[in-house]
Image (cartoon, rainbow, N blue to C red):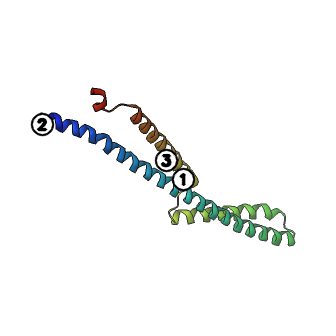
Amino acid sequence: MAKTTARASSQLALPKVIEENLDRLADTLSKLQRDAEKLQKQLVRRGKKAEREGRKQVNKLLKDIQRNGVTGRIKNARRDVEKTVDEGVTQVFRLLNLPERKDVEALNKKVRSLEKQVGTLRRSRRRAPTRAQASA
């Protein structure tokens, strides 16, 4: 009799534990998504700023070259400056240990997938009767 009562109480406690863990998981996933979105916005702002500064440098260089009448060097200089700016931005991101856009997008995709799974688990849990209800 004591074993039956202990089993019944542990079966009732199990769904509560699962629900609490699902709630914690959902909260964690929401926080991860907010953090990922915030980081993505920061990266976009930094990238735009770096792009603007790079364009200013390229335009200044182009004007200087055009004044000197050396149009053949313009394309080469522009490519060199753009490459240098891109490498610099990439190096800064690496030094700051910032993820690349593709990494943030992959994280967002995983978060959405996990949120979908949590929702499915919650819906299936609500639909399925507990063992106590089924045996009554």
Closer-to-camera residue (114/85): 114
Where residue 58 sits, quadrant-wise, is bottom right
Which quadrant of the view contains residue 65?
A: bottom right
Q: Earlier in the sequence, mark 2 or mark 1?
A: 2
Q: Residue at x 58, y 54 (%)?
A: 101
**Residue 132's x, y, as percent?**
28, 32
The image's mark for residue 2 is 2
In this picture, is 49 found above or below 21? Answer: below
Q: Position of residue 11 (x, y in %)?
A: 25, 37
Q: Earlier in the sequence, mark 3 or mark 1?
A: 1
- Rendered residue at 46%/50% (across/down): 29
| Residue type beneath disc 3 | Val
CB-based contact (under 8 Å), mark 2 and mark 1: no
Up/down of 81 relative to 20, above or below: below
Closest to the camera, between mark 2 and mark 3, is 2
Of badges 3 and 1, the one in the foreground is: 3
**Position of residue 22 measured from the top left corner of the image (x, y, whole percent):** 39, 45
User: Quick one: 16 or 63, which is closer to the camera?
Assistant: 16
Residue at the spot of label 3: 111
Which residue type carries mark 1?
Val
Disc 3 from disc 1: Cα separation: 10 Å
Chain-order first, disc 2 or disc 3: 2
Q: What kind of residue is marked 2?
A: Ala
**Residue named by callout 1:** 104
Please identify, in this view, whether the residue under mark 2 or under mark 1 is nearer the observer.
Answer: 2
Residue 94 % position (x, y): 53, 62
Per the image, label 3 sits on a secondary structure element best described as: helix
Q: CA distance from mark 2 to mark 3?
A: 44 Å
